[in-house]
Image (spheres, helix red, strand yellow):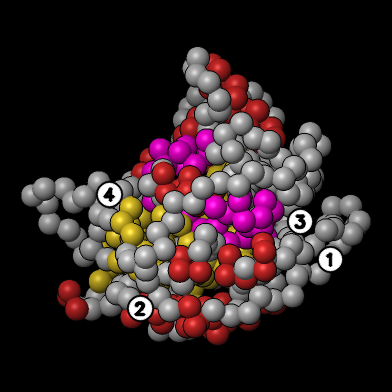
Amino acid sequence: MALGALLVLVATASDRAPEPAPATAVEDVATGAPATTAGADGPTPDDADATAATAATSDSDDSGEPRAFPSEGPRPGRSRPRRFTLVATGDVLLHSPLWQQAEADAAAAAQPGRDFRPLIASIRPLVEGADLAVCHLETPVAPPEGPFAGYPSFSVPPEVVPALADTGYDACTTASNHTYDQGAAGIDRTLADLDAAGIAHAGSARTPEEAGRITLADAGPAQVALLSYTFGFNGYTAPNGETWRSNPIDEARILADARRAREAGADVVVVALHWGNEYVHEPTPQQVDLAPRLIGSPDVDLLLGHHAHVVQPLEHVGGEWVAYGMGNLVATHSTPGAANHEGLLVRFTFTQEGGRDGGWRVSAAEYAPLLMVRDRTPTRLVDVARALADPATPPDLRARLELARDRTAGVVTSRGAAEAGLTPIAA
């Protein structure tokens, strides 16, 4: 987990771009039937219908002053190296089988409610060991006792947020096609819960003032700005017409925000994009067209992609890295396909060049294949390399892990990433 404070700095609201038109419907890749929109996440049969979420009290600071997030602080007596590591993972997309598993795990520990920590415990060493760990919380959270709902309008148990914090995540991006699923109350509640857990956030907002701020995270020797945008909102309009509630993908807007982030003191600027086609490994024309223009800006240092629910390639573009899509961290889609059980953890080491006044560049790019094991009890997210290194792993599971390892390696290196230096993280 990152050492030092996480904070958000004020920026002007004049850089806001207008809301784009809602995404258009596309054909479901599994059934051929019309999907709700290009961003519909496959339904789970036992998901309940969503009901209106109750309003939540916002704890946002409207004063326009920087806000400090909880900090562990620097270790006494230790000088900071002029490098840091950043870890990022894919979509946190909770369907009902996952909160049922969390209920079972809590009951097994004689605890009330739901415990999502065992579900993702396998990646804790990698996440906790990073100077800055970033997740993507795709859906709004519900009040503690629900109602909970999956597709098409998600409202998920809030216990997932402290579980992410316990696993070692420092920040989450929140701009997605499901950001508006539960209206303004869902956004307010989600950001309040992230604040309570000490997790910084970018991509959605409770007030216009919050929408204009740049999220800065202390990653040890460097300040990292986190920006988050989405292709659309599944046809939902902005709650109460408040288009500042979340961030659409708009090239001019992203570049302007990145420039403001640099001016606000960011040493490294990370842009998260919710984009691509669901269940498709290959990047879309939009992805391969827009990515080089964004990463080519002197104000953007890394692109992180979400939404496809399968792993997409990494690419080294002009000396910097693009992760087109990291698949899922956790999800249980009913849409058939083994590939949507697989995900990706990426780890980038940034090193300062030319001394303390130099710029920051990625000096090492690494990845770890992940697998959501659903066909045995209990359901668990598995660090593939670590499980393969364990001699106690059963033969049938070992075969599935090898498939995930090999398919992930083939996809992530398909655009020349291995030749550019990408390597798997050793178990």
Label 3 CA crowd tier, 10 Å (few <14, some 14–19, many 20+)? many
First reached walking from the N terminus: tag 1 or tag 4: 1
Q: Mark 3 points at which residue?
A: 40
Pointer 1 residue: 25
Name the mark on residue 262.
Answer: 2
Report the Cα–Cα distance between label 1 and label 4. Answer: 44 Å
| Disc 1 and disc 4 in contact, CB within 8 angstroms | no
Q: Which residue is drawn at 37% across and 68% down?
A: 64
Q: Quadrant of the rendered structure where residue 336 is?
A: top right
Q: In this view, does 370 lie to the left or right of 131?
A: right
* Magenta residues, start to end: 159-188
Under circle 1, the secondary element is loop
Q: Where is residue 273 in the image (x, y as percent from the top left)?
A: 57, 67
Question: In front: 290, or 148?
Answer: 148
Instruction: Check disc 2 and give the amino acid type.
Output: Arg
Give the residue pinned by disc 4.
Answer: 71
Q: Horizontal and vertical percent for residue 285?
A: 70, 77
Tell me the distance, in whole angstroms, between the alpha carbons under discs 4 and 2.
Answer: 23 Å
Callout 2 secondary element? helix
| 188 to 276, vertically: above or below | above
Three-letter residue code for mark 4: Ser
Residue at 50%, 14% (x, y): give it.
110
The one of 65 and 27 positioned closer to us in this rendering: 65
Quadrant housing residue 36 = bottom right
